[in-house]
Image: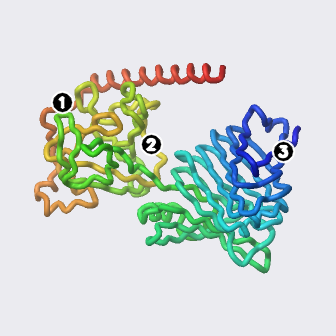
Amino acid sequence: MAVIGIDIGSSNQVINSSNYDADAGDTLQLNVLGSNTLTVDGVDAVANMLVSVQAIGTPTFAVINGGSLSLNYGLANVSALTGVNYEIGDGSSITVDAATLAVGIVANNNITFTGNGGGAFVYDPAALSLATPTTFTVNSMAVGDSLWVEGRSNGTLSYNSDTQTATLNYNGNLSTGLEAVRFQIQNISQADYDAMVQQYGTSNIGAFVSPVCFLRGTMIQTTKGEVAVEDLVAGDVVIGKSGERTVKWVGFRKTFTKQIPADRRAEHMPIRIVRDAIAENVPSKDIVVSPGHHLYVEGKLVRAKDLVNGKTIYQETHHISYEYFHVELDQFDVISAHGIMSESWADGGNRDYFQNADVTALRPEDRQRRLADRPGFTVVRNKAEIQRLQATYAARAEVLEQDSATELKVACA
């Protein structure tokens, strides 16, 4: 067991398995708080604040690679700080124990989730209650990121559409010394907030795990460079297999999983194709599409669901909600999205699936379901061919897994 002195008043510090042994009961003692960063990398660390605070300092506590940090503020004079930043990576966590001192006297408490989900911030309130709540500004919450006030289940949820801020508020009580705590979650759309309400309601909230699904952001190659699919508009020019094609219409639909019968969700929930799943840099980064969406593979169009191998191509079932976009061109083609060729919208009489479609203003026959035409392309439906493709990319997944393990061994060596 060792007490390790840490000074983040003069320089950044990193705690990892080379200098910290959680099993041996090591503890960090924060000697000076300034405006530098303490990074906890992959270990479970405990830190006690016992001493001085630099005036107008703004320390940052960052936890990455599945690590955790438990901060005990004790009697440290944190009122001298301008603010405190908490940065939380994938599967990592920070617990703040306010002990006998209310952290609310710090002007700015900022929480930023830096990964793709699964991070956690836990606040253990002080015994002292202030007239104003302890407030945390929360940024970049992703699916599975969580906020939790220890011992509380009286959270309420509200929304300001003008600022796109969702507020998660845990009321306090001055007479009993129950500290009020508030999380202000930034950049939340109305649809995202609706998903939160569907999951939790607006009152009696305990631990809060983000149900917000960020499936936007698929990047489409255009003559102006890559553009997020939700930002495409009619008249934009994209790069198709046969050359430049003009965007005619972009459809979108937001779906809440609970609205779909459980036995039919596999027909709707997204398929993820991870980087390099098809070939090197194909796709160049993960891409998420609907199960029936066709990808251009080996010179043919194949539905995403027909490529699933459970490792590098798999269906995601954790989403509370998800939003699909589709791009109609002046002529059917496949277009580049994350380094893989992906079909444009093919008219199968399903335009009214999209919530922004005025089917009457487009074509009355759009209400009639029919086999979509994909002129110039071969569509794979043969069971034997589908099984061959699945086996091909399952075998590639095994190779990628072995290569990853080899790289890890080399890194560790």
Where is residue 369 drawn, in percent x and y? 17, 50
Q: Quadrant of the N terminus?
A: top right
Residue 96, placed above or below residue 378: below
Query: Which residue is drawn at the image coordinates 45% and 64% (left, top)?
Result: 194
Q: How many marks?
A: 3
Label 2: how many Cα within 10 Å (few below 14, some 14–19, many 20+): few
At mark 1, the secondary structure is loop
What amino acid type is highlighted by mark number 1? Thr
**Residue on which the image places disc 3:** 5
Instruction: Residue at 61%, 65% (x, y): give it.
Output: 183
Q: Say which quarter of the image contains residue 355.
A: bottom left
Distance (Cα) linking label 1 and label 2:
27 Å
Crowding at dot 3, Cα within 10 Å, few <14 / some 14-19 / many 20+, comes out as few
- Residue corresponding to mark 2: 316
Contact between labelled residues 2 and 3, with CB atoms less than 8 Å apart: no
What residue did someone put label 1 on? 378
* Location of residue 221 with respect to 120 vertically, above or below: above
Image vertical order of residue 391 relative to residue 67, above or below: above
